[in-house]
Amino acid sequence: MTARAGIIWTLLLIVAGFFSLAFIFYTLFPGQVPANAWQYFTPGEVERARRYQQIMRLAGILAFLAQTALLVWLVSSTRAAAWSDGVLRLTGGRYYPALIIYFILVWLLLKIIGLPFNFYSSFIVQHQWGFSTQSLASWWLDYLKGSALDLVLSGAGVILLFLATGRWPHTWWAAAGLFLSGWLFVATFLWPLVVAPLFNRFQPVTEGPVPTIVTRLADRAGLKIDQILVMDASRRTTKANAYFTGLGATKRIVLYDTLLAYPPDEIEAVVAHEIAHWQRGHITRGLLWGILANFLLLGLLYAVLKLTFTYEIARPGPYPPHLLVAMLLFLQLVSFLGQPVQNVISRRYETEADRVALELIGNPRAMINLQVDLARKNLGDIAPPPFIEWLTSSHPSALARIQAAEAYSRGQ
């Protein structure tokens, strides 16, 4: 490793460590809640939500730190290279079988380390706080299906990536970026048709106020929306939510079935928000930002690997399997540190969708009531500490969205 590479890795680890410590500090000591929150929430509601979010945030950051520590140990010791040599001997020097075995070994280690945090936060905590309606067997079935999907897709990606390092040793990162760009569009198009049905059932909303709401709002937005789907979220949770997904013919708005119990004007606010995402092309715009970020990330990865593993990269043929660990560590650190950029774009889109939704429904009181009800029932942190919001929040806080609706009301 060159001195310059050592500085880069050290800087990444120091900044990630600082961010992690700051995240833990503000999770444990979130500070004062703005005084205008008491107009909508009681101190008991705020405190209960903060306790729940505290548990979830600590579980998430500890999982990140544990997995990062494993990757740092593998990269900084001789263990990663020794395992690479071992699987090559096991396969009689056959490169791609060795790469597959090596990938599965590292993948399993990361899954094993992350499993306790995942199980605690997504099953135990959700039951303790009265959200989960899922049995243990159902949770394991979801976990195994998700893991199998991740193993297949990640494994295919690793094989293609290392194949590219052998075929285009100096420009593989550009080839990988092109492939990943195409895959992002294909995956976004296919996800509602192939992946989502593996975990939930989706049915058109044919009764109640939703069809009328959809027709009215779609006309106002100048869109053709044939139907909105309802998802059987109540099989797993009591939380309410909605989302917009898909591309082209697979575009769809999905409501949790738990949301259908909300007042009609609040459902209208939710539908209007998702229609706004559709009208403003947020998925496509987000994909384009993601493509730009992927090219930048892969280019930086190549530059860092070239400095760090100069001898291994200079050899003919694909990279040795043990470089996979360094790649994973780099991507883990940079993805963590890049969250603020990703989230500021996401929050901007969500703010825009709220504004357009208010224009569509002309009812800021419904939007305010929706944010209050969602925060109460989902135990959302109505006003997270600024650092945590900057680092990890993909949506504006409930209080910020309420204040935006109040401002719109005053401007009417």
Image: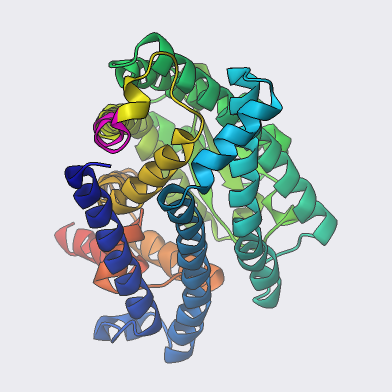
User: Quick check: 89 above or below 330?
Assistant: above
- Looking at the rendered image, the quarter that the C terminus falls into is bottom left
Q: Does the magenta portion include 308?
A: yes
Q: How many marks?
A: 0
Q: Residue at x 41, y 22 (%)?
A: 180
Quarter residue 30 falls in:
bottom left
User: Quick check: 317 above or below 404?
Assistant: above
Quarter residue 148 falls in:
top right
Image coordinates of residue 364 in percent, x first then y, are: 32, 59
Residue interval drawn in magenta: 302-310
Q: Residue at x 58, y 45 (%)?
A: 255
Q: Main secondary structure of the magenta part?
A: helix
- Looking at the rendered image, the quarter that the N terminus falls into is top left
> Which residue reaches farthest bottom?
43
Q: Nearer the viewer, residue 134 or 335?
A: 335
Q: Nearer the viewer, residue 230 or 366?
A: 230
Q: Is residue 123 left or right of residue 76?
A: right
Q: Residue at x 43, y 24 (%)?
A: 319
Q: Is residue 39 left or right of residue 152?
A: left
